[in-house]
Amino acid sequence: MVQDIAKAAGLDKAEKTVEALTDFLTGIDAEPEPYVKLAEAATANRRALIVEYLQFVADLGNPLCIVIDEYELLETSAREFLRVLMRRKPESCRLLILVNSEREPPSDWRGAMVPAIKAANGDVHSIPELGRDEIARWHEDVIGRAADASTVDDLIQRSRGGRPAYLAELLYAVLSGRGAPRVPDFDELQAARRRSLTPAAHLLGDLMSLLPGDVAVPRTFLEAVADVASIDSRSAIDELYGASLIRHVGHRTRFVHSSYAISWLSGIGVRRRDELKEVWYKAFEHAGFTSGELTGGLLSLVAPRLVERQSGENIAKLATSLAEHGAQDDSLLLLTTSWRAAPGAETLSSGVIEHALQAARLQLDLGRYAAVHEPLRAVELQASAGTPLRNAADLLRMKLALRLNRYGLVWSLSDKLIRQAPSAADVQLERELILNTALRDVMDEDGVRASTERLRTLLAHADEAGQAAIYRSLARSLAKTGDVAEAVRLASEGLEMANAQGDARSIGNAHLALGEALRHARDEHTALAHYHQAIDFGSATGNRDSELWSWLGEASAHLQSGDIAQAETSLRVARSLVEDPTFEHPLETAHVALIGALADVLSGNVVDDDAVLGRYRRLGIGWPESYLRETRDKGSLPHALPI
């Protein structure tokens, strides 16, 4: 079954991911455990297969409901994949997301997720606070007798305004007689429960109280931590569980409520906390600092010790592994702890500078453009001109300028890198790929032609991944300069290369390049099939840029075919993506407005040209003005839309 799903997803060559998903779905007793193998599979491939699996289940007529509990605790990659599921889930599938919007520090729920839910025509509901009547009924249900007004007042006061978690503790304390006749203070109640524990269970609770927020720790790793502390883990865990202090969530264990951990930790001094953190560090050390154990918020316990005791190379490898497994926030925490922990800007080692560069690159990949500047600036202040580190920083700054459509800075940095690293083939390849994209953006045809010739020269020095990237870039460039037959040939070869490599992200990008080449060749029907594939791969792998450009290409292909209604349907999806408040898309936003204006012109509607063209003028791009005018004069598109 999984092989069929993989083939449908175009990933039948992704053997490791297929094996991991097979073990996970069949529940096979394997080593390592199936969920560990699945976590270690390529993120892009894993996402694509999960999406295809959900569709497979739905196509069999099965009801599907996905429940996401505690959204605020999800890592960045999980939140990104959740937004993917909102767009890619089967139509019959229901997605229910639960969140505590009051938890500190606040998550991106209000700023990012709520707008995304509304854009997908979803509903957002808030659960109101319990009123006096509800509290009185709860009291009667638990205690067995009605509560008078003074009892309700007391419960509200002691439960911090009627919060359910505190009310539950208070009511069951009254029921057991522990607090009668006075309802106990919450911290007093928790302290009394701790005093009743055996030393082993108390020590394990001390260790768990260091976990941030409501973080859950893998049970097998919790047992390893207990071993380091010379605790009988099984009896200690059973005792804490029997006392209703902890609960098991899948294969992880956590406190029943964050308030339990907060109350517990408040009774532990600073020196003792440091001793307990050393226990956690030794447990991670014994586990070999595997990224699977460090994810889920546990890294904050040991990050300072890791930075202090591990080599810069090991820190970089671990951060890379964390990011590859989807724990981008943990990876950033480790890298940021490293480069900020250095005693001063003038004493940063090359390894620490690498960590700052790695952090900046990851922030860029996550679309957090404002957060790129601080670590990138640290690199620029330290790395000497012409060194590999400074060249890498300049390439990253160049890529950031491209993402923000600041083309003057792109040209300037490109010239600088030509001067500083003329013989560094890897630097010149990445520089040329970024430059080529920028030249296509502004439709500098002479510049694009010159860039394509340089890319052909660099092809001989590139590895397989670099060659595939060059083929995609050449195809999209040649399509814009009119050599559509060669563009289609190169894009087709690029797709074959990507399929052979088996990476879902590259396959999606290759479908996009072929779709662009075919659309410029005016084979819109075939182009649409590849755009659809690119959208599937882009959304399933979280490749936001590829997905967005694919929707823009699909809208353009429909418009070129005269299907205005379908063009507007595709455009609505593209618009929802560019309006996501967590990302910045100046050029793509302008393209959305232009395609919409062209659809209006072809439908005979009035268009405010200045409102549409103003965005392009601010970016220094002039071709849309003549294209819009020619469309109005002819009553049809003059040629393939050159976005």
Image (cartoon, rainbow, N blue to C red):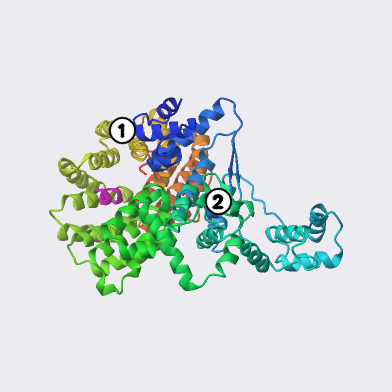
- Crowd rating for badge 1 (residues with CA inside 10 Å; few <14, some 14–19, many 20+): many
**Residue ID for mark 2:** 235
| Snapshot quadrant of residue 457 | top left
Task: Indicate the secondary structure of the residue bearing disc 2.
Answer: helix
Amino acid at dot 1: Leu
Query: On the picture, is 573 further left or further right than 620?
Result: right
Q: Quick one: quadrant of the C terminus?
A: top left
95 to the left or right of 81: right
Sequence order check, earlier mark of 1 and 2:
2
Q: Is residue 458 visible?
A: yes
CA gap, disc 1 to disc 2?
56 Å
On residue 186, which mark appears? none
Q: Position of residue 562 (x, y in %)?
A: 46, 33
Q: Quadrant of residue 126?
A: bottom right
**Residue, x 80% and y 57% (percent of image)?**
139
Whether 99 is among the magenta residues is no
Label 1: which secondary element: helix
Residue 604, given in percent of the width and then of the height, sits at 52, 41
Q: Which residues are magenta?
A: 433-438
Question: Of residues 291 and 186, which is closer to you in this image?
Answer: 186
Residue 195: horizontal and vertical position, in percent? 62, 65
